[in-house]
Image (spheres, rainbow, N blue to C red):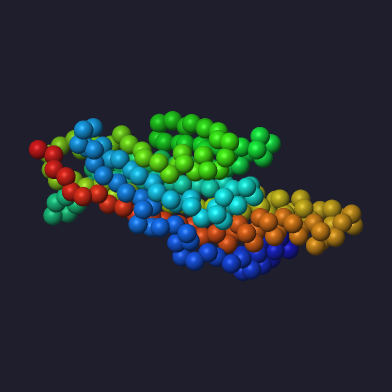
């Protein structure tokens, strides 16, 4: 019953057009910083500009942003010289009526709180310098990948448990199935599960270490 409801919602949802309201050209860029030992500097653009993403966060679904930067040494066969990852989770705190951003890297985790979605969004759509740089001579370049998702496997499992809880009163005769499912299904499934995952890629120009 639960699986059928989730499948129905997935089929009923209306996915956004490819790319949504995000301008892919400005979504992500990466460049070396000569003044800092050619560390990569990432600029994240308007990846959260779609109003549906804010609605998803307010509905209780976390927005996950994953970054991966790789340093490549140019040659006959390009070689991977190092990589760094960083992730962000933006979620709503309904009791406080605030939004939080959890920042997690390979070395530390940090939680920041913001009064509005716009402020939390601005914390993500920013510039970041990562601790990665060449260690020998050669010609190099950076690549960067940003993945944005609104739903993971664990979220689906949580959703199924939530739906079971919603259905229990109806099944025991204390309420109707439409009343038990209607609001949650319409708000959380139709509006949220239809949001597509998004992936952005960027590459820097070549630079040389002598």
Quarter of the picture holding the N terminus: bottom right
Q: Residue furthest left?
A: 210
Q: Is residue 186 left or right of residue 21?
A: right
**What residue is shown at x 47% (from left), y 41% (from top)?**
122
Q: Return the x and y of residue 145 as percentages of the image width and height.
A: 36, 51
Q: Is residue 169 left or right of residue 131?
A: right
Q: Residue furthest right?
A: 173
Q: Is residue 37 left or right of residue 3?
A: left
Q: Return the x and y of residue 189 as percentages of the image width and height.
A: 65, 59
Task: Look at the picture and state if 94 lies above or below 76.
Answer: above
**What residue is shown at x 39% (from left), y 46% (from top)?**
44
Task: Tell me which corner region of the image, top left, top right, bottom left or bottom right, holds residue 86.
Answer: top left
| Residue nearest the viewer, comparing 49 with 197 | 49
Q: Return the x and y of residue 115 as percentages of the image width and height.
A: 58, 36
From this viewpoint, is residue 7 visible?
no
Task: Look at the picture and state if 10 lies above or below 59.
Answer: below
**What residue is shown at x 21% (from left), y 50% (from top)?**
205
Q: Is residue 67 left or right of residue 173?
A: left
């Amino acid at each position: 019953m639960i699986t059928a409801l989730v499948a129905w919602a997935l089929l009923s949802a209306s996915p956004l057009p490819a790319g949504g309201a995000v301008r892919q050209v400005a979504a992500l860029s990466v460049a070396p910083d000569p003044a800092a030992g050619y560390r990569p500097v990432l600029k994240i653009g308007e990846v959260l500009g779609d109003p549906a993403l804010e609605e998803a966060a307010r509905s209780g679904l976390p927005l996950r942003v994953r970054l991966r930067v790789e340093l490549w040494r140019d040659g006959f066969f390009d070689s991977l010289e190092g990589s760094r990852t960083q992730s962000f989770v933006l979620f709503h705190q309904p009791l406080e009526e605030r939004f939080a951003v959890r920042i997690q890297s390979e070395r530390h985790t940090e939680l920041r709180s913001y009064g509005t979605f716009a402020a939390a969004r601005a914390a993500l759509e920013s510039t970041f310098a990562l601790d990665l740089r060449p260690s020998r001579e050669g010609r190099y370049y950076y690549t960067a990948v940003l993945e944005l998702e609104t739903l993971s496997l664990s979220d689906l499992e949580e959703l199924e448990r939530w739906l079971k809880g919603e259905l229990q009163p109806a099944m025991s005769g204390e309420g109707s199935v439409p009343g038990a499912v209607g609001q949650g299904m319409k708000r959380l499934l139709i509006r949220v599960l239809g949001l597509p995952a998004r992936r952005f890629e960027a590459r820097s120009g070549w630079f040389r270490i002598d």
